[in-house]
Image (cartoon, rainbow, N blue to C red):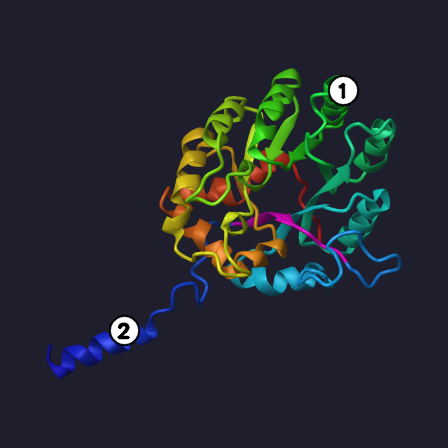
Amino acid sequence: MNRRTWLKQTAAALAAPAAFGAPPSPPATRIIDCHVHFYDPARPGGVPWPGKGTKLYRTVLPRDWLAVASPHGVRETVVVEASPLLEDNQWILDLAAKEKSVVGFAGNLDLIDPEFAEHVKRFAGNPIFRGIRARGGLAKFGEARDQIVQSAKVLALHGLELDLNGPSSMLPAAAEIAKAVPELRIVINHLGGSGDPREINTGWKDNIRLVAARRNVFMKVSALVEQVKCGWGAAPRDAGYYLPVLDHLWENFGADRLIYGSNWPVSDKGAPYDVVFRIVSEYFSGKGREACEKYFWKNSLAAYQWRERTS
């Protein structure tokens, strides 16, 4: 190699953005992050989650999320409530009223609470309230099936959706609810509990096939890096590492029912926001432009039916 060639190659390498460094061009015309948590331990009464002394125990508000997301063209979100406190649902709605970046909110209610229908009716009047994340997932489905199905019907009656989070063993129950209440839109969180892509949880693949067969079920590609067994922030940055999970979800849910969600700030356990975003950007960009448009925002509109915010 002569000196001129060496200088050209060196200059090109220095000019190129480092892997997972400078953000690439937005992969879609619009990007909505459908899994973000906001909370403030400093407010009166504090917060029940996250726990004191943890790295997540800090004030996390829209401006903090926008600081890490907006450089990648991500400026809108559907917030998901993790707190079991009823009034924390109102706290987010009050926050969202002043934050136009929030296009929707999945609250946190207990499907087997005797007052579930009343709570839903209370919050459903707010157009930002788009559904709930079931507290405790479906851990009690075996003993409270009828009550849970009835609560699912209440959500459907109000045009709301149901977010579900839990292990892969929860997925058959989710499929049963989807069959019993076909008018209800269900969004499975966090890959349906896949586990580390190199050590996928037993039964996950079969349960994904089962729940994906119900056309009213969507899958949120969230908590991808947190599934990895590693130290804080040390998840692999190569998109190829996650192919065993991503490919299986693509094969079963296809282009129309996969949704972008970062799970920030919890995602920091696995990797920074830019890494999380780049992994899925690389993967879905390989599926074509229309697949990106669907994954990054159009599918979230179908699942959450969020409303446009006026300025």
Q: Is residue 255 visible?
A: yes
| Crowd around label 2: few <14 · some 14–19 · many ≥20 (10 Å) | few
Q: In the image, residue 92 lies at what x, y percent? A: 78, 50
Residue at image point 55% right, 38% down: 193
Disc 1 target residue: 150
Left or right placement of residue 69 versus residue 181 in this view: left
Left or right placement of residue 19 versus residue 109 in this view: left
Q: Locate the N terminus by quadrant.
A: bottom left
Disc 2 target residue: 12
- What amino acid is found at the position of numbered circle 2 in the picture? Ala
Sequence order check, earlier mark of 1 and 2: 2
Q: Is residue 133 magenta?
A: no
Disc 1 is placed on an element classified as: helix
Q: Is residue 27 visible?
A: no
Q: Give above or below for 51 relative to 258.
A: below
Disc 2 is placed on an element classified as: helix
Which image quadrant is residue 4 in? bottom left
Residue at image point 47% right, 43% down: 293
Q: In the image, residue 106 lies at what x, y percent? A: 71, 41
- Label 1 vs label 2: CA separation? 61 Å
Q: In the image, residue 15 lies at what x, y percent? A: 33, 74
Left or right placement of residue 249 versus residue 125 in this view: left
- What amino acid is found at the position of numbered circle 1 in the picture? Gln
Q: Locate the C terminus by quadrant.
A: bottom right
